[in-house]
């Protein structure tokens, strides 16, 4: 479905629980078509004559309930994100190179680099919200103002939002409007920018592409928006579907949006949360027609089902092990490294990386649907990604891990097989992880065993994995009771890392800041990288830097599998040619069960 579910919010995956970045010049998300030799199709067309109407059953594979906040600038977790992306639409469409394609989407853009102006124009059309009220450029300007207000507490107020002239003054209450938002007419706005960089032309949300209805929210504070029924049960959106009924945390029933700008869908839709343990049996029974994110650890149990087609994409997800090395300085509005943090020792971080065998986990546990990641950049960006021959990453080398610890001064003083810190005091590393499938939990326990084998005493925070909501809240609010965590990001169409790892990035959960690193990030995000050669060189230097200064240990790159029941007439899951919901048809009244 053009993979809209991937573009922002918290992301839960089977092999690891991940966090996706929101609304900044570096982030959005994407997938790339799996090579033919990997054996996955990206499109299926099933036989049969389409029936009139019907309800498509959509399974959201998750071991946690969705939160229930359905507003594109307010929501956080991916469960809500799936629902938001059915009820709202993005301004732009994208091509196969992740660049904004003016032939797609409801809006087109023009970038005037010399004068630093980004123009957004709603193409000719009768645009309406799902309640029938007009959708105009005023809604876009209003959304930008909400993101920029001083009472906005969400994660989408970023350096990119601040890149528009006048936002800082508006945010600080020194101006009643944003001077850099120049309304030309009801379809057009010019954004006067402080800086111009290549990410502006890509799907990385360097320019805000989200809208909420001004006529609904115009008199609400941020907190009133959060609690409003219009953000939860009476959602007024711009997407293909309208939320009709909700069972909190469990399911959402949708009906067709008659005002959807691409045309009213032919079907209704029902989304259910289904656990990773139940999804295969439900799929076999024909209870679900569309399931993205099939659990790779169960691949052998569903790969040969005759009632479905498996479509596959190499996702742009990076899972990792992160380290808490500092804190957020609210007064300064930036991350600060704390030299006293135990994880501030690069030797300790490297030892942790060499102690785990992600190659075997990828091959044996995830059936080759995951591969060990060697950098924090996905191979999706084939012109920028650096292979293992140049940046090897952290392969399994327990003896090297032990040697690194020894040379750095970590010794087993009391003979219990576990090293003490450099002062000879007990070293306990508190490990934050989200609850996942049985397989994911087993992988975490194996990690802990591997770390113990090289002398590291790693313990799950409070002795257990946490439900996803609690886990995500700890990261988002910069809790300080853990030393290390597993997580991940869905990188955007533009891979510039500043929005994830920069000194002001909301998603820099480990608070790593270092002058050389910051300088690299700034150059990558600057207009220097309009030059492709310079861009490639800077990304090489960044990946090499992270190898030598690992503030996070890359874990996996992953294929995502989408199961499509044979009663769905046609489905294409690529970004550039993806089937829109308005195109989906069914060829039977109920799902086909496996024989």
Image: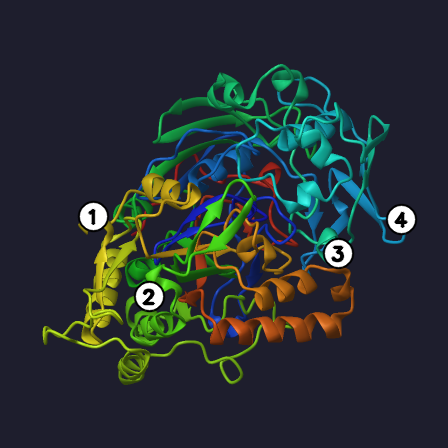
The residue carrying mark 3 is 197
Q: Residue furthest top?
A: 219
Q: How is the image coloured?
A: rainbow
- Which label sits in the foreground, 2 or 1? 1
Q: CA distance from mark 1 to mark 4?
A: 54 Å
Q: Residues within 10 Å of mark 4 (few under 14, many from 20)?
A: few
Q: Is residue 72 left or right of residue 66?
A: right
SS of the residue under disc 2? loop
Of the two numbered discs 3 and 1 on the same chain, state the one appearing first in sequence.
3
| Sequence order check, earlier mark of 3 and 2 | 3
- Density class for disc 1 (Cα within 10 Å; few <14, some 14-19, many ≥20) is few
Label of residue 366 in the image: 2
The residue depicted at 35 percent of the width and 38 percent of the height is 273
Whole-number angstrom distance, CA of label 3 to CA of label 1? 44 Å
| Residue at 74%, 65% in the rendered image | 529
Which of 566/270 is in front? 270
Which callout, 4 or 3, points at the residue further toward the start of the chain? 4
* Mark seen at residue 511: none
* Real-space CA distance between mark 3 and mark 2, rounded to the nearest whole angstrom: 38 Å
Q: Which residue is mark 1?
A: 462
The answer to whether mark 4 and mark 2 are in CB contact below 8 A is no
Up-down: is 340 above or below 216?
Answer: below
Q: Nearer the viewer, residue 197 or 271?
A: 197
Asked if the residue at tag 2 contacts the one at tag 3, i.e. Cβ–Cβ closer than 8 Å, the answer is no
Residue 336 in the image: state x and y as whole percent. 49, 53
- Of mark 4 and mark 2, the one earlier in the sequence is 4
Circle 2: is it few (<14), some (14-19), or many (20+) Cα within 10 Å?
many
What's the distance in space between the residues labelled 2 and 1, CA to CA? 28 Å
Q: Nearer the viewer, mark 3 or mark 2?
A: 3
């Amino acid at each position: 479905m053009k993979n809209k579910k991937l573009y922002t919010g918290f992301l839960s995956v089977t092999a690891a629980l991940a966090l996706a970045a929101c609304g900044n010049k570096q982030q959005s998300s994407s997938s790339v078509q799996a090579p033919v030799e990997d054996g996955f199709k990206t499109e299926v067309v099933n036989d049969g004559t389409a029936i009139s109407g019907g309800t498509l059953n959509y399974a959201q594979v998750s071991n946690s309930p969705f939160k229930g906040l359905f507003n594109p600038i307010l929501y956080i977790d991916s469960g809500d994100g799936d629902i938001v992306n059915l009820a709202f639409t993005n301004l732009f469409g994208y091509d196969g190179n992740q660049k904004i394609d003016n032939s797609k989407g409801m809006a087109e853009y023009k970038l005037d680099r010399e004068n630093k102006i980004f123009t957004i124009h709603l193409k000719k059309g009768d645009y309406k919200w799902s309640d029938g009220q007009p959708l105009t450029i005023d809604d876009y300007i209003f959304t930008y103002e909400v993101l920029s207000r001083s009472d906005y507490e969400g994660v989408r107020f970023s350096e990119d939002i601040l890149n528009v002239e006048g936002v800082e003054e508006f945010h600080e209450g020194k101006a009643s409007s944003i001077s850099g938002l120049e309304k030309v007419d009801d379809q057009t706005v010019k954004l006067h920018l402080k800086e111009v960089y290549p990410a502006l032309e890509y799907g990385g949300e360097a320019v805000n592409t989200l809208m909420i209805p001004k006529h609904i929210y115009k008199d609400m504070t941020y907190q009133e928006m959060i609690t409003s029924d219009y953000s939860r049960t009476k959602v007024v959106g711009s997407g293909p579907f309208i939320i009709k009924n909700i069972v909190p945390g469990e399911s959402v029933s949708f009906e067709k949006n008659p005002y959807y700008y691409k045309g009213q869908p032919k079907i209704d839709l029902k989304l259910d949360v289904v656990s990773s343990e139940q999804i295969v049996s439900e799929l076999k029974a024909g209870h679900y027609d569309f399931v993205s994110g099939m659990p790779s650890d169960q691949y052998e149990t569903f790969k040969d089902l005759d009632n479905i087609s498996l479509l596959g994409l190499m996702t742009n997800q990076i899972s990792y092990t992160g380290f808490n090395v500092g804190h957020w300085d609210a007064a300064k509005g930036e991350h600060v490294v704390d030299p006293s943090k135990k994880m501030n020792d690069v030797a300790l971080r490297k030892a942790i990386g060499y102690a785990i065998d992600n190659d075997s986990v990828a091959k044996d546990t995830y059936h080759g649907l995951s591969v060990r990641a060697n950098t924090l950049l996905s191979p999706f960006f084939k012109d920028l990604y650096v292979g293992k021959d140049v940046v090897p990453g952290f392969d399994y080398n327990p003896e090297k891990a032990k040697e690194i610890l020894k040379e750095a001064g970590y010794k087993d003083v009391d003979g219990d097989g576990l090293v003490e810190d450099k002062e000879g005091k007990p070293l306990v590393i508190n490990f934050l992880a989200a609850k996942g499938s049985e397989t994911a939990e087993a992988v975490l326990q194996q990690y802990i065993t591997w770390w113990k084998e090289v002398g590291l005493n790693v313990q799950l925070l409070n002795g257990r994995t946490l439900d996803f909501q609690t886990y995500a809240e700890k990261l988002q609010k910069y809790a300080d009771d853990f030393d290390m965590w597993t997580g991940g990001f869905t990188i955007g169409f533009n891979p510039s890392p500043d929005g994830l790892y920069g000194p002001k990035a909301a998603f820099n959960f480990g608070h790593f800041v270092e002058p050389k690193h910051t300088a690299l990030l700034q150059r990558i995000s600057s207009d220097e990288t309009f030059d492709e050669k310079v861009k490639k060189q800077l990304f090489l230097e960044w990946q090499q830097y992270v190898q030598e200064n690992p503030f996070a240990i890359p874990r996996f790159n992953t294929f995502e599998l989408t199961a499509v029941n044979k009663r769905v007439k046609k489905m294409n899951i690529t970004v550039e040619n993806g089937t829109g919901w308005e195109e989906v048809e069914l060829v039977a009244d109920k799902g086909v069960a496996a024989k």
